[in-house]
Image (tube, rainbow, N blue to C red):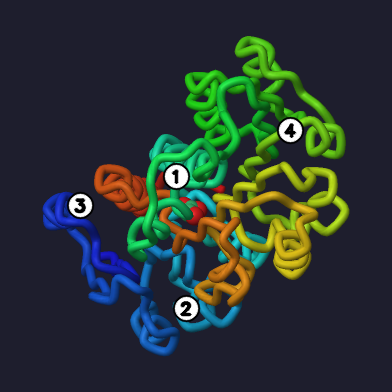
Amino acid sequence: MPRVHITFPPPDGVRRRLAEEQWDLTWSDTPDGQPRSDMLADVAGCDAVITLLTDRVDEEFLDAAGPQLRVVANDAVGTDNLDLPALRRRGVAASNTPEVLDAATAEIALGLVLATSRRIAEADRFVRTGTPWQWRTDLFVGRDLAGATLGIVGLGRIGLAVAHRAAAFGMRVIATPTRSGAAEAARRGIDLLPLEELLGAADVVSLHCPLTEETRHLIGARELALIGPEGILVNTARGPVVDEQALVTALTDGTLGAAGLDVYEDEPRVPAPLRELPNVVALPHIGSAGRTTRERMAQLAVDNVRAVLGGGDPVTPV
Ligand code: GLV
């Protein structure tokens, strides 16, 4: 029987189906990620491992697993935790979980767009702290989304799901050019602009590109200044796409209007200013945290393992 390890507790629905697999299966009961040393011990001798985005799959991991390892199925759409060249060198297949989390991530992105532009989190804190108030014309006046321009950086599946929802709010949508998205953009009336032009034209900028060497610190001081003092940045992609130090400075000195963040450069560390500034809405990386979505992600990871152990290619290879 092939040996399979899952580095987290699978959702209940997936557990029921896992019971039907002819695998020598183990999983970790730590939903917050398995301690590295435990994980390295548990993957020893495995044919397949299902990993979280917090698990670093590098040479050390691959050495610990051993040469029989055939597939690493990442339970995430992002693959920046995987050393893909090392996996390729060793002939180990890799997969991710695209599509199944598009809507859930777009919902959180739109939630951050709404919360920052209409100052929802700030107003909620105001009420909770018992501040005396009465209706007045200048209470938490924010930016109307209807008629505002949303700039999407990375018009892939999630970017398109965000565009679709933003259009329902009456936003004009623009995006940076993509190889695959041009026809879809034209069909949906999304104008494609180079990054700098987009940053200058958008009221709200939402990031949906993967983290790669090309996109690391794609948004730095200059780019934040282009978004401007009335502008809003939303990041549900990966923290290091934004230079976090530059972001803190821009939010503190007013170069940037506000930020809605689900991801950070050095998770789970959130720099104190991002926790304290009133013009920041900060979430703990919950973009894909819908019950159905999480079940679909884990099931897709299992399907990828089954496909490779059955002698085929992953269903959603990377
Ligand atoms: C979440 O961040 C993912 O990559 O799935």
Q: Residues within 10 Å of mark 4 (few under 14, many from 20)?
A: many
Mark in the foreground, 2 or 1: 1
N-term-proximal mark, 2 vs 1: 2
Amino acid identity at mark 4: Ala
Is residue 185 left or right of 236 when viewed as pictured? right
40 w.r.t. 13: above or below? below
The single residue placed furthest to the bottom in the displayed view is 37
Indicate which disc residue 14 carries.
3
143 w.r.t. 312: above or below? above
Residue in view at x 77 percent, y 66 percent: 249
Amino acid identity at mark 2: Gly
What's the distance in space between the residues labelled 4 and 3, CA to CA?
A: 41 Å
N-term-proximal mark, 2 vs 3: 3
N-term-proximal mark, 4 vs 1: 1
Residue in view at x 56 percent, y 82 percent: 60
What's the distance in space between the residues labelled 2 and 3, CA to CA?
A: 27 Å
Q: Quadrant of residue 155?
A: top right
- Counting from the top left corner in percent of width and height, residue 33 is at 37, 74
Mark in the foreground, 1 or 3: 1
Indicate which disc residue 108 carries.
1
Amino acid identity at mark 3: Val
Mark in the foreground, 4 or 3: 4
